[in-house]
Amino acid sequence: MPSHGSLTKAGKVRNATPKMPKKERHKEVPRVRNRIEYEKRVVKAKQAKQAVPAR
């Protein structure tokens, strides 16, 4: 099975790029994230329906 390019060229670009420090990523705890999504989906939608004047 032929390879795509010679093995002498493998990893040249990756080794040439400067090493960057990892970014600190923060996700909420799933319980908190689910509560926020629930409020967006249910509670705020209910408030928006109540704010519409009845005809």
Image: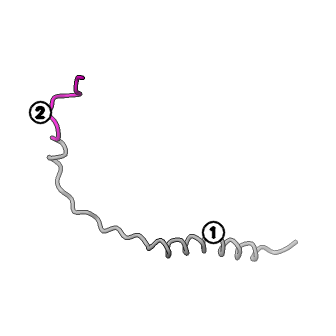
Q: Identify the residue under disc 2.
A: 8
Q: Residue furthest top?
A: 1
Q: At 14% from the left edge and 32% from the top edge, which residue is drawn?
A: 7
**Of residues 19 and 5, which is closer to you in this image?**
5
Instruction: Sort mark 1 into few (<14), some (14-19) or many (20+) by Cα contacts within 10 Å.
Output: few
C-alpha distance separating marks 2 and 1: 55 Å
Mark closer to the chain start, 2 or 1: 2
Give, as a single range, the part of the protein colored magenta.
1-12
Q: Is 5 colored magenta in this rendering? A: yes
Q: Identify the residue under disc 1.
A: 41
Q: Residue furthest right?
A: 55
Give the SS element for disc 1: helix
**Of residues 3 and 42, which is closer to you in this image?**
3
**Of residues 5 and 54, which is closer to you in this image?**
5
Quadrant of the snapshot with the C terminus: bottom right
Residue type at the position of mark 2: Thr
Residue type at the position of mark 1: Arg
Instruction: Sort mark 2 into few (<14), some (14-19) or many (20+) by Cα contacts within 10 Å.
Output: few
Taking the image as shown, residue 9 lies to the left or right of residue 51, namely left
